[in-house]
Image (tube, rainbow, N blue to C red):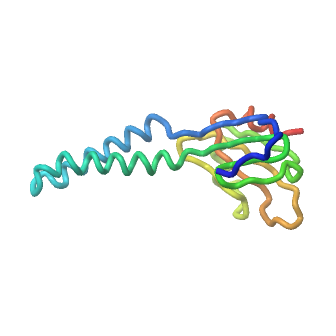
Amino acid sequence: MAATQSGTHVVYQEKVRPSVGMWILVVVAALSTALMVMPVWQLGTIILPVVSFVLFAWWLNSLTLTIIVTERQLFVGEAHIDRTFVPGAVAFDGEEARQARGVDLDARAFLKIRPWAKSVVRIDLDDETDPTPYWLVSSRHPHKLAAALTP
């Protein structure tokens, strides 16, 4: 992740980690690999699930989304933008979030959404040189994130 500039105050910080349900799916997927090799490789019924779990867990953990709002910049994963280009943000929950991720989505938007975090924040952009109209970001605390980005 990109480092924040020294001397800047962090206004908001959040890590959108995978849910318990996603970890259960990883365990089930790893255990199911034992069933595939059981008829032909007895030792594989132990080795393959362990290796699969490690790989699946590494992959799932890599999908953790880090959001940092400082006085000067916004960081969402590896992406960042100066706050001067962010006039405001709107939080969406429930049905509004589903529509923001679906029928109301602009194809030019920058997306950092995760299936285990249903709430999203639309971060509006005001930059004539950037064709991206807004960022749509998953958040477990969308109203706090929107408040941190709204002047």
Q: Residue furthest front?
A: 6
Who's the residue at 57% across and 47% down the image?
Answer: 114
| Displayed quadrant of residue 6 | top right
Q: In this picture, is 76 found above or below 119? A: below
Q: Position of residue 20 (x, y in %)?
A: 45, 34
For the image, the number of numbered tags is: 0
Q: Position of residue 38 (x, y in %)?
A: 13, 51
Q: Position of residue 31 (x, y in %)?
A: 26, 44
Who's the residue at 74% across and 32% down the image?
Answer: 144
Side of 142 where 71 appears, left or right: right
Side of 1 where 81 appears, left or right: right
Who's the residue at 79% across and 54% down the image?
Answer: 81
Taking depth in this image into account, of 88 and 68 the one nearest to the observer is: 68
Side of 123 where 62 appears, left or right: left
Considering the image in quadrants, where does the C terminus appear? top right
Taking depth in this image into account, of 32 and 63 the one nearest to the observer is: 63
Taking depth in this image into account, of 120 and 87 the one nearest to the observer is: 87
Side of 74 where 43 appears, left or right: left
Q: Position of residue 139 (x, y in %)?
A: 65, 39
| Displayed quadrant of residue 23 | top left
Who's the residue at 31% across and 42% down the image?
Answer: 28
